[in-house]
Amino acid sequence: MSDKVKVTIDGITIEVEPGISILNAARQIGGDVVPPAMCYYSKLEGSGGKCRTCLVKVSKGSEKDPRPMPKLVASCRTGVMDGMEVQNITSTEVTEARKGIVEMLLINHPLDCPICDQAGECSLQDLSYEHGLSKTRYEFERRTFDKIDIGDKIQLHMTRCILCYRCVYVADQITNNRVHGILGRGDASEISTYIEKAVDNNFSGNVIDVCPVGALTDRTFRFKNRVWFTKPVDAHRDCPACKGKVTLWYKGEEVLRVTGRKDQFGEVEDFICNTCRFETKKTSNWVIEGPRNIVNTSVIASNHYETLKPLPVIETSQVLIDANKVEFDRATKI
């Protein structure tokens, strides 16, 4: 007898381990069935339930109790039950609610994309493109904060922050001494430290990797280049502090920055130390494994650097014709 439970998401049935969340069950299916998530991070205990972007509709609770749940639920915080049926992209109620959530997140988030270092790999950009509205109803003054340096190599631009708490959790769980957190309450809440440049430990740079927007940025990389002009390459080294598995971002022969490797859901596979991130920016420091596999829906993939030469124009390139059709079908569906 199988210990697994059956859950149906957008008409697709899958068997999963009991107790996992709807979001992680959807991730096992993959594709558009997976709800977006701005605050949930599978490697951080306690994360999730803050941004509400992963809301789904449970149209059937379980085989034992088939009644639907009366309200939309956060898929990252709701466990699956045997026989549960969930609607994500197949529910107009969910898609409309998601538009409202994106509008709320953008109330205080400035349109900094032209100058923000996170542009091109920003979860909020993707979310607003896929689920957002073309205009906002908010007419009041937005809250603003001064930029501060919370570490010698980390800058905090709180004006862009969406209070996902990821940086707080990562500092709590992988460092010995967390010195930053949420100050204030309500619309006065902010991520900060009591003393400027107080964040000083060997794993502090990971708060940059987990930030889904451009609130926490690498001071050694700021304004040096756009990510779509760089070439990400997987590499590793023998490091006594971490696993040393990273992604190097090249511009020509220069390593502009070093980041942790991220999976298909934008989560870091292995957290890296500051020595790997900030102090080893020479090719000679690393064993190169090869080009990073970038999903073709990302603007970073526009370089097509795996081919070593530009692809032909779209009229004669079947690869680009197919990619263009996928994007057209996706835009039509949205």
Image: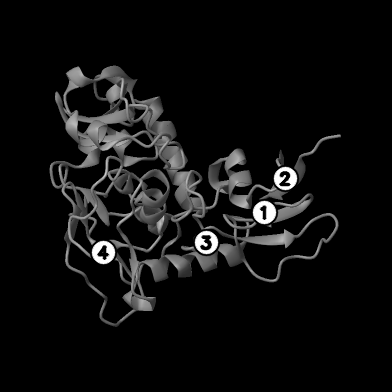
| Distance (Cα) linking label 1 and label 2 | 8 Å
> To which residue does mark 3 refer?
49
**C-beta proximity under 8 Å, tags 3 and 1:** no
Circle 4: residue type: Met
Q: Residue at x 61, y 39 (%)?
A: 28
Q: Earlier in the sequence, mark 1 or mark 4?
A: 1
The numbered dot on residue 18 is 2
Circle 2: residue type: Pro
| Distance (Cα) linking label 4 and label 2 | 39 Å
From this view, report whether residue 101 is shown above or below residue 250.
Answer: below
Label 2 environment density (alpha carbons within 10 Å; few <14, some 14–19, many ≥20) = some
Quick one: SS at disc 3? loop
Circle 1: residue type: Gly
> To which residue does mark 1 refer?
79
| Distance (Cα) linking label 3 and label 1 | 13 Å
Quick one: SS at disc 4? helix
Which quadrant of the view contains residue 146?
A: bottom left
Relative side of 3 to 294, left or right: right
Name the spot of residue 140 as percent of width and height, x first.
Answer: 29, 82
| Distance (Cα) linking label 1 and label 4 | 33 Å
Label 1 environment density (alpha carbons within 10 Å; few <14, some 14–19, many ≥20) = some
Name the spot of residue 248 as percent of width and height, x first.
Answer: 26, 29
Name the spot of residue 238 as percent of width and height, x first.
Answer: 31, 20
Q: Earlier in the sequence, mark 4 or mark 2?
A: 2
The numbered dot on residue 158 is 4
Q: Earlier in the sequence, mark 4 or mark 3?
A: 3
